[in-house]
Amino acid sequence: MSQTRPRCLTIEFRNRFFNEHNKRGGIVTSFASWLAKGPWPIDGGLSGELEKRGHNLADKLWSARLLRDAPEAIAEVHQDYVDAGGRVIITASYQASRTGFVATGMTEAQADDLMRLSITLAKEVAATAPEKVWVAASVGPYGAVLGGGQEYVGNYGVAHEDLVKFHRERIEVLASANPDVFACETIPDLDEVRALVEVLADYPHIPAWITMSAQDGASTCAGQGIGHLAEIVKDCESIVAVGVNCTMPEHVTSLLYKLSAKTSLPLVVYPNAGRVWDGENMCWIGEGHTTLPSKIVTEWVSAGATLIGGCCGLGPDAITQLDNDLAQLR
């Protein structure tokens, strides 16, 4: 595998991306056009930064609780990531849903307002940036509502229709706040991808990416081959990128090559810091990275990664270094 990214490879990926959109009859949006000029840095983990600042997130709502209790804290973290060079802000809606909020005593209307607030907070920060910063509405997996780390397992035993209903409900609310893009993230199971594709097909005017969590260098957390992701999304015009997130960094290069062998879509990757999630105690255990080594970032770009950021445990310092590394590869 090449450890550097020749200029000709950059052009090849861009051309393949535009050609695929033309063949699928989709419109190349401004976001897709910007993607093709990458690689670009996105933000890092939200929850870890909030915890560092003294917020206890050992709650079923996780970081979404602060949409109600301390929205200014979320905005501060968004601002730090923009200052670090992040060009995409992912909202605090990962664990936000009517189901989750209502279980804490809120009404559905209040839940909807908080989901929309997650986008408003990010937009207000993005509007102050000297360069264009995109706002990605986080659409976390069904397993995040179940708790106990189910988003790292999959195989929920839930009917397809129920998954579609769950995601349609929240995506409809998030769409009403006009995000730039949907970030369907940490999806553990291809069955859930199918449900998301069905819903996203109704929103062709909003680009989306789908990133899965993986258990090794070849398989989703539910044990399916990662390459099948590309096959499932290929006819959904709104999906402009696919990839992996909240996955051990050492697995990423292999996963990206398996995806790039199946699709010409740009690839997205934002791994965790390399620690293990303890679902029972709702905490990360073990030692991990504080930044992403420049060498592996270069490998990921060579494998087709166009958007790179961090997930749980990787903060603004990691994004600052990443921004510097990616600027040399564009």
Image (tube, rainbow, N blue to C red):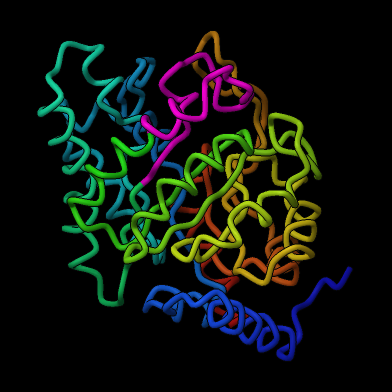
In the visual, does 9 lie left or right of 86? Answer: right
Q: Is residue 149 magenta?
A: yes
Q: Is residue 122 above or below residue 287?
A: below
Q: Quadrant of residue 48?
A: top left
User: Which part of the image, by quadrant, shows the C terminus?
Assistant: bottom right
- Residue name at image x 27 percent, y 55 percent: 79
Residue name at image x 60 percent, y 69 percent: 266
Q: Residue shown at 12%/36% (left/top)?
A: 113
* Front residue of this view, candidates 67 and 161: 161
Region in magenta: 138-166
Q: Is residue 263 above or below residue 97?
A: below
Image coords of residue 5 (percent x, y): 75, 79
In the depicted structure, whether residue 290 falls above or below residue 260: above
Marks counted in the figure total 0
Give the quadrant of the N terminus. Answer: bottom right
**Where residue 82 sits: x, y (%)?**
33, 61
In this picture, residue 262 sits left or right of residue 267: right
Give left or right: position of 276 versus 199.
right
Q: Whole-percent x and y of residue 18?
A: 56, 83
Residue 317 at x, y percent in the picture? 48, 53
Residue 68 colored in magenta in the image: no
